[in-house]
Image (spheres, coloured by chain):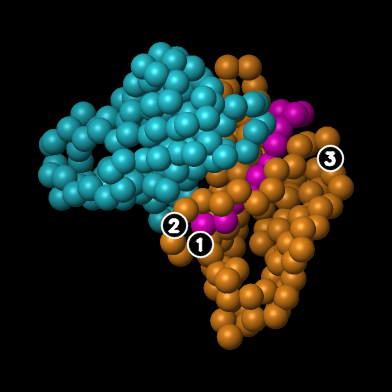
Chain colours: A orange, B cyan
Amino acid sequence: AQKVTQAQTEISVVEKEDVTLDCVYETRDTTYYLFWYKQPPSGELVFLIRRNSFDEQNEISGRYSWNFQKSTSSFNFTITASQVVDSAVYFCALSDLRPGGGNKLTFGTGTQLKVEL
Amino acid sequence: DAGITQSPRHKVTETGTPVTLRCHQTENHRYMYWYRQDPGHGLRLIHYSYGVKDTDKGEVSDGYSVSRSKTEDFLLTLESATSSQTSVYFCAAHETLGGGYTFGSGTRLTVV
């Protein structure tokens, strides 16, 4: 069975601090995708990034960066110089690409990030 | 983006009544999903569809049924609502395997 663990339930930081959100996953598949979604207080789910299992290069997008390490089954998300607008719940998710699996996403329980002035 | 619309956005219903939530997409995506979001559980899959009239159960399907008679519409029905089904329901869609989901805005359902 697939599983995603986000052990950090809530993180509070002061604006301009860097913060890393942890994601650990379990799967027996050799091919899979990992995702991060953001859910701001307004409630919608916003896609941030997709990473396939064959690409372990780190990715940077502005203040956001992602560190994918297959050896430790982790896909961590770092926000540099956090801002109040980063306050949200962040979800990590793992896809099921098995035949007949319907490409279902398994989500972690989310990390609530609070960025304060 | 799939252009997903969920209706209603909010609903309060009584225990034992049937409820249908609607998800409509405008991009002709093949795959559609219903998730529920509850504190401490993240998002959990209820049912999904991989084509018209092709549906399957997710991890929390008890008490729910779905139908997909057209590509663009995916309906979630609670046959007899219970208080444990109070939740926020999200619909999602995508086209390709491994593709990122696009989510609707969610439906907040309260069963009293």
Q: At label 2, which amino acid type do we have?
A: Gly
Which label's residue is closer to the chain start, 1 or 3?
1
From the top left corner, tell me how far across and down residue A68 is, in percent: 79, 49
Tell me, yes or no, whether dots 3 and 2 are on the same chain. Answer: yes
Label 3: how many residues lie within 10 Å, few (<14), some (14-19) or many (20+)?
A: few
From the top left corner, tell me how far across and down residue B5 is, in percent: 40, 40
Q: Residue A100 carries which label?
A: none
Determine which residue is flagged by label 2: A43
Q: At label 1, which amino acid type do we have?
A: Pro
Q: In this view, does B66 lie above or below A45?
A: above
Q: Determine which quarter of the picture holds residue B53.
A: top left
Q: In this view, does A48 lie above or below A40?
A: above
Seen from the viewer's position, the closer of residues B51 and A75 is B51
Q: Is residue A55 above or below residue A16?
A: above
The answer for how far apart the CA atoms under marks 2 and 1 are is: 6 Å
Q: Which residue is drawn at 45% across and 43% down?
A: B104
Label 1: how many residues lie within 10 Å, few (<14), some (14-19) or many (20+)?
A: some
Q: Which residue is drawn at 65% across and 51% down?
A: A48
The answer for how far apart the CA atoms under marks 3 and 2 are is: 31 Å
Q: What stretch is highlighted in magenta?
A: A29-39
The answer to whether residue A34 is magenta is: yes
Q: At label 3, which amino acid type do we have?
A: Asp
- Chain ID at mark 3: A
Tell me, yes or no, whether dots 1 and 3 are on the same chain. Answer: yes
Determine which residue is flagged by label 3: A55
Determine which residue is flagged by label 1: A40
Q: Can residue A85 be seen in this view?
A: yes
Q: Which residue is drawn at 39% across and 47% down?
A: B106
